[in-house]
Image (cartoon, helix red, strand yellow):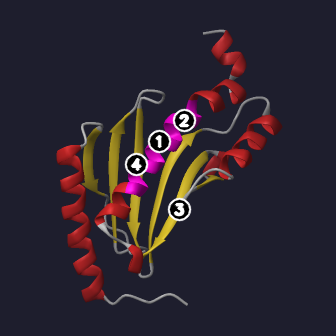
């Protein structure tokens, strides 16, 4: 079982994450906003990093500090309207190539990218890799997935 971090250790990590995110924003022009989410008793701290994209207008990565892991996720798109089997086949095949994240189905069958990082592996370079990877995965997959799951809508636009 992974290490369970106490309140003092988590407070240190929370301050470090704040600093690392501020540093990332100072050098990454794609980042348009970073902030804390509303407090919630189910997690220690939560942030969002909002980035301007090319394929998708904006990608927002949510980062949640738990007692053992740092969870990260981003909303990709709603459930497909058509070609459902081909759409999900494409998602599963894309999962094969992803490192540190996976496509998943969330609320209302919407598509998300999610992953977890053990807190003992958390470092500034890892946080940068996680945020950059999720951004890249969304940018690479958004248009092809849109073309499969919303083909009629795109033809009629």
Q: Which mark is residue 140?
A: 2
41 vs 79: above or below:
below
Find out whether the residues at labels 2 and 1 contact each other: C-beta distance under 8 Å.
yes
Judge left or right: residue 81 versus residue 74: right
Residue identified by numbered label 1: 136
127 vs 78: above or below:
below
Give the SS element for disc 2. helix
Q: Nearer the viewer, mark 3 or mark 1?
A: 1
Magenta residues span: 129-142
Judge left or right: residue 89 versus residue 129: right
Asked whether the viewer can see residue 105, the reply is no
Measured in 3D between alpha carbons, the distance from the residue under mark 4 to the one under mark 3, in whole angstroms, is 13 Å
Residue identified by numbered label 3: 115
- Neighbor class of circle 1 (other Cα within 10 Å; few <14, some 14-19, many 20+) is few
Residue identified by numbered label 4: 132
Measured in 3D between alpha carbons, the distance from the residue under mark 4 to the one under mark 2, in whole angstroms, is 12 Å
């Amino acid at each position: 079982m992974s290490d369970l971090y106490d309140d003092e250790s988590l407070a240190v990590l929370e301050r470090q994450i704040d600093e690392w995110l501020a540093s990332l924003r100072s050098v990454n022009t794609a980042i348009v906003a970073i902030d804390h989410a509303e407090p919630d008793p189910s997690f220690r701290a939560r942030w969002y990093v909002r980035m301007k994209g090319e394929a998708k207008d904006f990608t927002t990565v949510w980062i949640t500090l738990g007692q053992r892991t740092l969870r990260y996720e981003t909303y990709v798109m709603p459930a497909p309207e058509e070609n459902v089997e081909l759409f999900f086949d494409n998602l599963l095949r894309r999962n094969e190539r992803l490192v540190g994240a996976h496509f998943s189905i969330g609320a209302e069958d919407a598509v998300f990218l999610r992953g977890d990082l053990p807190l003992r592996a958390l470092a500034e370079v890892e946080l940068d890799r996680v945020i950059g990877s999720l951004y890249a995965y969304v940018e690479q997959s958004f248009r092809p997935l849109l073309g499969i799951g919303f083909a009629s809508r795109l033809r009629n636009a």
